[in-house]
Structures are given as structure tokens and as C-alpha cells.
Amino acid sequence: MPEVAGSDSHVPEMVGQAYTEINASENTLDAVLEAIREGKVSPAGKNTPTPIILKQMSGSARRKIKKKTVS
């Protein structure tokens, strides 16, 4: 089963951090799809930077605290 990269960006800074390298014979839709079917792909990208992780964690904590105080 070929693996491709995908991202679920919740902040604009992370859009485009995950991508798929495709070893296609040419730059056409058919060649790209064939390369994917043949497994000539590899997921790639960058890890989430620590400041972004901390920003997401603090937002999550704030939402949980707000939910408990409103209930």
C-alpha cells in the first residue's frame, strides 16, 4: 500500500508542512497516478515546531478551563 503525506493544519503556519515526494516518469496526471499506484512515493515534511505545539496546547487548556467554569 503506497503511503502519502497529508496534513490537518489548525494554524496557518503549518499549511504545506507535509508533502509527498513522487518519482513520476513525467509531469502529467497519468504519470503521477501511475507512480502512486506503483509505490514510487514517499511521505515527507517537517515536524511541528515547539512554539506551535505550545500555542495549540495552551489554546486547548484555555478551552477546557472555560468549559468547566461555564458548566
Image: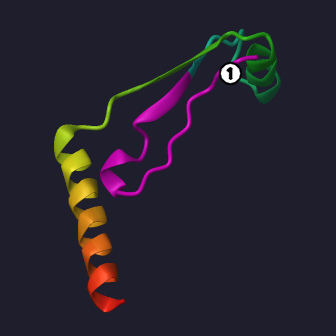
Image spot of residue 66 (x, y percent): 27, 81
Q: Where on the picture, by quarter, is residue 59? A: bottom left
Residue 21 left/right relative to 28 = left
Q: Start and end of the magenta stretch?
A: 1-20
Residue 18 left/right relative to 5 = left
Identify the residue shown where x is 26% and y is 86%: 69
Image spot of residue 6 (x, y percent): 56, 37
- Determine the residue located farthest toward the left in the rendered image: 51
Please tell me which residue lies in front, 69 or 25. 69
With respect to residue 33, does 56 lie above or below? below
What's the coloring here? rainbow
Q: Which residue is mark 1?
A: 27
Q: Helix, strand, or loop for circle 1?
A: loop
Q: Where on the picture, by quarter, is residue 67? A: bottom left
Please tell me which residue lies in front, 21 or 58. 58
With respect to residue 14, does 27 lie above or below? above
| Three-letter residue code for mark 1 | Asn
Residue 58 counted in the magenta span:
no
With respect to residue 66, does 41 lie above or below? above
Residue 45 left/right relative to 68 = right
Please tell me which residue lies in front, 62 or 19. 62
Quadrant housing the C terminus: bottom left
Identify the residue shown where x is 32% and y is 30%: 47
Image spot of residue 16 (x, y percent): 43, 41
Quadrant housing the N terminus: top right
Q: Residues within 10 Å of mark 1 (few under 14, many from 20)?
A: few
User: How many labels, in total?
Assistant: 1
Magenta stretch, overall SS: loop
